Structure formats: structure tokens, C-alpha cells
Image: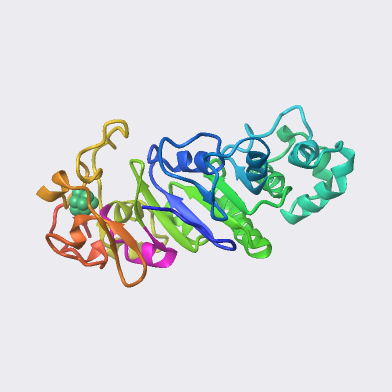
Amino acid sequence: MDLAVERGKTLGLVGESGSGKSTVARLVTRLIDPTSGTVQIAGGDITTLGGGRLRTVRQNVQMVFQDPYSSFDPLSTIGRSIAEPLRTHLGGGHSRHKPRVVVLLELVGLSAELADRYPGELSGGQLQRAAMARALSVEPDLLVLDEPVTALDVSTQAQVINLVSDLQKRLGIACLFIAHDLSVVRHVSDSIAVMQLGRVIEQGPAEAVYTAPCHPYTAALLSAVPVPNPVTQRARKRIVVSGESPSPIDPPSGCRFRTRCVFAMDICQEEAPPPYVNDQGVIVNCHLHTTGPKLEGRSVLELAAPQKGIST
Ligand code: SF4
């Protein structure tokens, strides 16, 4: 299944550890090369580029990493670190870019005074904002955020998610927002893609995927997200997955989720499920939509409660 994100939109990419989300981020930023397939930016394949054209791509695609502390040089001030991409791509010394650094700090809600501080003097939330300022310094077309809130406490997470949403709207850039928690990407994403064992198994408009998941794995990820209202939490139907995720080096035959799927049928072992597109534009790879209960694009949560693996 292909992944695509348009200018001015955010694609949320979710999945467990080892599902391949961060590999996608590294492919898009050309930190690694693909063994097959292409990565297209503005219609052009970037996987074969080198030299000056690769440098231009690297300017247009910027990344924010999970751990803000390890993504900054502890011996360099915040201002110098934010100016680093500007010096690389535009040349000049640190002082030339000082005014721009102040504008960038204000853009992400930080005081200009922080330019002279060192990373160890900032909180995790402040540092992640500074990482966004650094990524935005060269006005990229695509911002890749690889689990940007995972290392932050809950209240700071909400602030950073709101900041991403605000910046994305104000600047009109495309964002690829990676997380392992569907609740994190829901409010910031226009569309959501779910990865399992190196494959995208469901993708579509954020609200459709969140409210009516078509793939058992998506439903299981959603089941793991607690609902703040205890009445709703008790009443909701949940799909539970057991067992460890198989190795991506030696995935199961047919559907890669079949060893953990409570709905697995004989065909799931024999054939990889083809994509099914429903009337809301959700694309799902699961035999349940064409075989057995024939959901035909409806939510997997419609399956009867007594079935093994669903708890109410
Ligand atoms: Fe489960 Fe089969 Fe669907 Fe895979 S294709 S998710 S094993 S029902």
C-alpha cells in the first residue's frame, strides 16, 4: 500500500515498536536507502539523487526526533543549534542568522532569551519546541516528526501536539507524524495509516479510521487506548491481541497478522489479503472484508461479541 501526504495536511503513521514506522521516516529523509520501491517528493523520485540535488531534498524534508536531549549538542547553545541548518544551506556565520533564530524561537512559543542557554538548561518540552524551530529554519516542504511526544510527560505532550497542529495550519507544510498511540495522532492528523510488521494494513481519513476501524490490528491498537469516561470505557467493545509480534525478517505466510489475529481463517495463512476500499475512502488489507463474515468495508467492531478475542 502506498503512503501519501499533501501540502497543508498531516498524515499520522501508527503501529507498535518494530512495525517499521521509523524506517519510513529514515527513508523519506534519505538517511537510509530502500531495497525496493520509490520515495517521491513533488513528483520526483529522491531515492536515486546524489550531490547537490540530494542536499536540496534534505533541506526540503526536515525531521524532529523522539528524544530532544540526544538530538542537541550539549556543548552548543540553543541558538547555535537552531542556526546550524541555516549555516549549512545558506552559508555565513552564526551572527548572520541570529535575527532569524529569534523569529523561529517566537514561532514555536519560546522566549528569545533561550538562544543563549544550553540544552541541559531547558525542559523536555522546551527542547522539543527548539527542535521544531531548528527543523523549520530552512522552510521545509515536509516535516517528519518521529514519535515527537513519546519522551514527554502527558501535559507537555498536549502542548507539543497543539503546537504541531497550529504550525502546520499556519505554514501550510506537509507533516508526517509518527506515534505508537492512535490517540496521539487523532487530533493532529487529516489521515491515518497503520503499520504492522513492515506493511501498511489500513489507511484513510483520521475520523473514519478512529471511529470505525476495519482491520483487527487497528481495532486492537484502539482498544489499548483508555477512554477518560468510565461509563464509556466499560460499555465499549474491545479487541484484544495476545502473543509477541513475529520477526519482520521471517514474517508469517499470507496475512502477517494471522498468528495474533482472533479472526484468522484458513485463507489468511494461504493468501496475503488484497486491498479493499470502502465508501469512506479507507483502504484495508484483511480477508474479513471479502471472505467469511464479509464486512465489505464496515468496521470490524461489528463482529458479534461472543467471538473469541472481543471483550465488552
Ligand atoms: Fe485476521 Fe485474516 Fe484479516 Fe489477517 S486477513 S487480519 S488474519 S482476519
Q: Residue at x 39, y 59 (%)?
A: 227
| In this view, 167 is above or below 118 | below
Could you tell me residue 3's position as x and y percent? 44, 53
Could you tell me residue 309's position as x and y percent? 19, 52
Quarter holding residue 6: bottom right
Could you tell me residue 1's position as x and y percent? 36, 52
Residues 38 and 148: in front is: 38
Quarter holding residue 46: top right
Q: Is residue 280 visible?
A: yes
Residues 155 and 290: in front is: 290
Query: Residue lying furthest top in this view?
Result: 75
Q: Residue at x 42, y 43 (%)?
A: 37
Could you tell me residue 256's position as x and y percent? 25, 43
Report the span colored magenta. Answer: 203-216
Q: Is residue 265 visible?
A: no
State left or right for residue 161 relative to residue 303.
Answer: right
Q: Residue at x 31, y 31 (%)?
A: 249
Residue 206 colored in magenta in the image:
yes
What is the quadrant of the C terminus in the image? Answer: bottom left
| In this view, 89 is above or below 160 | above
Residue 173 colored in magenta in the image:
no
